[in-house]
Amino acid sequence: MRVIFMGTPQFAVPALNAIIGDAHEVIAVYTRPPQPAGRRSLALTPSPVQQIAEQFGIRVFAPKTLRDEEQGEIFRSHAADAAIVVAYGLILPLPILAAPLQGCLNLHASLLPRWRGAAPIQRAIMGGDEETGVMVMRMDEGLDTGPVSLAERTPIDLDETAGDLHDRLSHVGARLITRALAALARNSLVFHPQSDRGVTYAHKISKEECRIDWSRPANEVHNHIRGLSPSPGAFFDADFGRGRERIKALRSSVVEGAGRPGALLDDHLTFACGRGAVRLVTVQRAGRAPMDAASFMRGVRLPAQVLRN
């Protein structure tokens, strides 16, 4: 099939590789424009999807918007059978959605209609979901509201982070989208309307909600930490002998313990929660690489009350 691929981050790379490997003709790749490499760098870095496309000699388009008439004409000129959209990052207006012969198919990282929107992987973990998956959806003008076809379910491990699940789902999704394209080529891909029950929205993560609220039960704090790991990262402020600093918590476990919420209970980075306690396994100081709790504790001075325990 003649395919347009639309994607930007690393999550989309396995899908692009799989489609190329299945000998579909990827006639164009659409991605977000190159971004600065870091906060202090002026150098622009192409997206992971663009880098793969260029390795295969596929023509890359990186418009800032698809809403103007010129971009619509360019998109229609590709004469694509289908467009595959995986974490692209731009809204597709109706003229774009209608251009490919068999429409635009989206690979979404949740079990729709649960967690429509921008951050389905993080929200599933933060919400304490025991299961998630990937689905193939035919796009319409709504926010992840189109009819759905193939799905692949998977359990979420109790200690799995958003980063772990992201990497796993990217490969599960790559296999699913190639199955969908093969069925589409045979005119056997069947779509069904989404249920109007169980709809939830995976809103973009805000900076404000990254702060850890130790007054919540330990399992909710644990889900909050792993759902935001590795980025943007749940954080707390504390003084470990070098003045008050912000520390990211990247991995944790639920343990027994009790105390005033937010109190450090021992020299293993165990913090009291509203009910129970959470032990931090991996943390990160500002400007430093992630480190395990034991390494972190060797370089800090503990409050006196902890030393007396």
Image (spheres, helix red, strand yellow):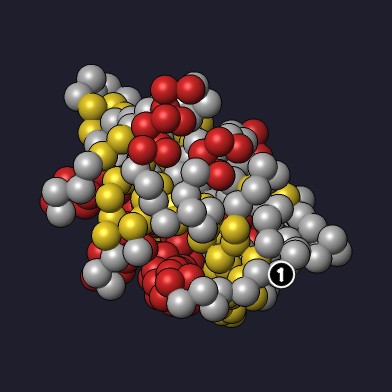
On the image, the x and y values in percent for residue 160 come to: 51, 70
160 sits left or right of 129 in the view: left
Q: Nearer the viewer, residue 151 or 84?
A: 84
Residue at 48 percent across and 71 percent down: it is 184
Q: Nearer the viewer, residue 114 or 266?
A: 114
Residue at 71 percent across and 53 percent down: it is 145
On the image, the x and y values in percent for residue 18 come to: 30, 68
Q: Residue furthest right?
A: 197
Q: Which residue is mark 1?
A: 192
Residue at 28 percent across and 55 percent down: it is 26
Looking at the rendered structure, the kind of residue marked 1 is: His
Quadrant in which residue 35 is drawn: top left
Residue at 44 percent across and 56 percent down: it is 82
252 sits left or right of 71 in the view: right
260 sits left or right of 268 in the view: right
Q: Vertically, is 218 above or below 43?
A: below
Q: Quadrant of the C terminus?
A: bottom right
Q: Nearer the viewer, residue 92 or 188?
A: 188
Q: How many other residues sit within 10 Å of disc 1, few (<14), some (14-19) or many (≥20)? A: few
Q: Quadrant of the N terminus?
A: bottom left
On the image, the x and y values in percent for residue 123 come to: 64, 55
Q: Secondary structure at mark 1?
A: loop
14 sits left or right of 275 in the view: left
Q: Can residue 265 be seen here?
A: no
On the image, the x and y values in percent for residue 221 come to: 66, 57
Q: How many marks?
A: 1
Q: Vertically, is 196 above or below 204?
A: below
Q: Nearer the viewer, residue 90 or 293?
A: 90
Quadrant in which residue 204 is drawn: top right
Q: Can residue 196 be seen here?
A: yes
